[in-house]
Amino acid sequence: MVNEQGIIEEVSGQKALVRIKKSSACGTCESRGDCEVASGKSMVVEVVNDLGGGEGDHVELSVPSGAFLKLSLLVYILPVVALIAGAFAGGVCAPFLHITPTLASVIGGFLVMGITFYALKRFDRSLRARSEFRPRMTRVLLRSDPHQSDSVKPSRM
């Protein structure tokens, strides 16, 4: 499980908007320069509020490790593979297009990588509907209102 902590900013029906705090793992992450959380910007995530959290509550969110690994491979590895495959295909097609192999490789690589990013963006929209890839609220760590009901127990994954 990949766990993060955050604070519920808004509750609307069965949904809650949670602002994620920067974790200690951010300090050693290779992508910390590109990540919204590590750059000082906070990230807001919408989750199902099945634990009955209220505004201001500190909660723990989890994403299954398998889902996190699949998404990481799609986002980081697939574009690189597309760039290499496109460059190779461009080099092979260069004689038929009557251009230099280097130029054909550059055009092919960026063209296929661009198509891959477009496909990933479309694929992202379909993944948002699938519950296995969405973060889940696993625990309420600290309630902002101590009189709020604790009758809902944390779910186990």
Image (tube, rainbow, N blue to C red):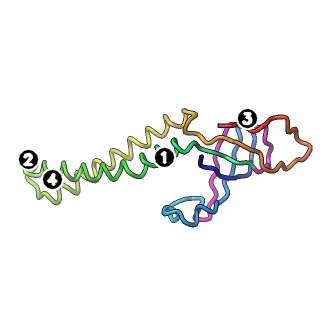
In the drawing, what numbered circle is on residue 50? 3
Q: Secondary structure at mark 1?
A: helix
Mark toward the viewer: 1 or 3 = 1
3D distance between C-alphas at marks 3 and 2? 59 Å
Say whether marks 3 and 4 touch (CB < 8 Å).
no
Residue under pointer 1: 69
Task: Please provide percent x and percent y for residue 51.
Answer: 76, 37
Residue tagged 4 = 91
| SS at circle 4 | helix
Residue 48, magenta (yes or no): yes
Which label's residue is closer to the chain start, 2 or 1?
Answer: 1
- Magenta span of residues: 38-58
Secondary structure type for disc 2: helix
Secondary structure at numbered mark 3: loop
**Type of amino acid at the residue the image marks with label 4:** Gly
Quarter of the C terminus within the rendering:
top right
Residue 156 place in picture, x, y as percent = 69, 37
Q: Is residue 66 left or right of residue 97?
A: right
Left or right side of 67 for 59 = right
Q: Check disc 4: other Cα within 10 Å, few if <14, some if 14-19, many if 20+.
A: many
Q: Earlier in the sequence, mark 1 or mark 4?
A: 1
